[in-house]
Image (cartoon, rainbow, N blue to C red):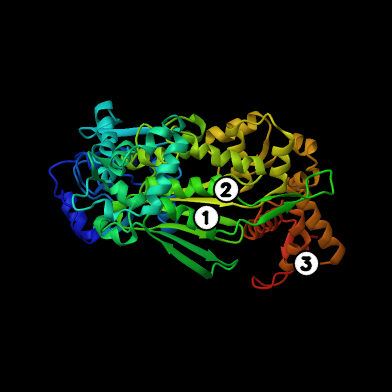
Amino acid sequence: MKHQHMEPAERLVTLLALASENEVVEFKEAKKSYDFTKLGKYFSALSNEANLKRQPAAWLVFGVNDHRQVVGSNYRRQRNDLDSLNKEIADKTTNRITFIAIHEVQHEQGRVIMFEIPAAPKGIPISFEGHNYGRDGESLSALNMEEYERIRAQATLEDWSAAIVPDAGLDDLDKDALRVARNNYKSKFPDKAVEVDSWNDVTFLNKAKLAVKGKLTRTALILLGKDESEHFLLPADVKIRWLLKDHQGNDRDYALFGLPLLLAVDRVYAKIRNLKYRYIPEGTLFPEELDQYEPYAIREAVNNCIAHQDYTLAGRINVIEGEETLTFTNLGSFVPGNVQRVVMDDAPEEYYRNRFLATAMFNLKMVDTAGGGIRKLFLFQKARFFPLPDYELSSNRVKLTLTGKVLNMDYARLLAVNGELTLSEIMGLDKVQKRQSLTGDEEKQLKGKSLIEGRKPNFYIARAVAQKTDQKASYSKNRAFDKQYYLDFIRKAIGEHGSLTRKDINELLWNKLPDWMNDKQKTYKIGNLIGELRRNRLIVNNGSMVNPQWVLVK
């Protein structure tokens, strides 16, 4: 089934004309509702099968029965409720991959929902809640091992960085970069230092995995090529862009660095203003002073972008400097699939997008292919009591953000006094301080250790921890009073003043509601409290709908 552009209604006609369902098309009646977990399993299965069938997309269609007759579906009638599926699916899939689009078609027999599901990226099976699914004919099943390996092998069959550039020669390499490369190689392998000095340039390039039998590869040009040699790599745009933004997000300065990238890393690093950060630890008047960012972390992040960029997408690497953040982006999916697994396993990856390039960068002391680079980023941030690195993974981009300050002093104090926390627990607590949702396993782990309290998704530091870390006030601000307290408080205030407007009640309760609530949540909560008192005939509105005046029922 080709994926030429069609309007949704045309696409539906094409799908209904199929002789039967297949590995990349699934029909469901879903007249009223549909189990979310099962929908997620179909997302994984159809995405993986589209990859294997070399189709750009697969289709899950609601409102159609097994005989391809339209019966109509009332599944998530509100458009914003339907659109929220994008995030719900992304939260549970590899690389946060979600739908290409969700189409609604008003067919004469009823409403049809067409979920357009992207094919799994080359080399990366798509899982849902950690499990890979596929199709056995028309049936949903686990992705079998042969298919799993076929998808994974796609990442290793072609290595763009290893290709020989037949017209490139030694004159196309930068002499300073070649000199630095030799020094770095000797530093990486000190037992070979004397031997390296006796090698001519061709021998060195072969030994360092920059050339193959004396012929330069794309890797050699990326790392050591002269700026004017970039035409050999077209259409790839092998550049690093540094961008400085102010606190409002406006661009203040920028610079562009091209070949050779071996030298560009230092030039980018020199642009970054790694300012001193000061904060006063608990129990002392003497401030701590440290760099906002660990120098190793900056270099590791830039070098990772170089090593893992998908150069076939013809995009640039970005380093964006904010007042208190550094953001690094590179094109291409995150090959390991899951950041938390990489951090917790602390082991070398089995697959690399640019294996030849990664090996050369390892030989030139740029990256650590022995594993642990990303884990070190987490440990450096932990040692500072700063928020852990934020990874945002989309189907074709990896975005890493480092925060150069203490975001939540309660979290920082917790790390400072509790040296027994595991990295997994710290990663969960980091999500709590950032108001990010926890997975079921993270919630179970943190609650099991009595580290957090509250209801999903609004967790906060637990009372026992708060008392140990002098966070009692913070704990009390996060914990809500019993509902009856608020109801009695409203009635008492109305009794004292005769009547209260909605504005009066808002001002009465606003600062008594927990700190984790945002303005919208507080407004909604107060409205529910007023509604409960009205339904129980304890208060009545003597004003209008626009300007209510709430009084006690006599």
The residue that disc 1 covers is 269
Alpha carbons under labels 3 and 2: distance apart? 58 Å
At label 1, which amino acid type do we have? Tyr
Residue visible at 73% across and 53% down in the picture: 278
At label 3, which amino acid type do we have? Leu
Q: Is residue 434 visible?
A: yes
Disc number for residue 295:
2
The residue that disc 3 covers is 500
Q: CB of mark 2 within 8 Å of CB of mark 1? A: yes
Alpha carbons under labels 1 and 3: distance apart? 60 Å
The residue nearer to you, when weighing 175 against 388, is 175
- The x, y position of residue 97, in whole percent, is 38, 47
Circle 3 crowding by C-alpha within 10 Å: few under 14, some 14–19, many from 20? many
- The x, y position of residue 225, in whole percent, is 33, 54
Earlier-in-chain disc, 1 versus 3: 1
Q: Is residue 518 left or right of residue 197?
A: right
Numbered disc 3: secondary structure: loop
- The x, y position of residue 106, in whole percent, is 28, 60
Judged by depth in the image, the label closer to the viewer, 3 or 2, is: 2
**Residue 365 placement: quadrant:** top left
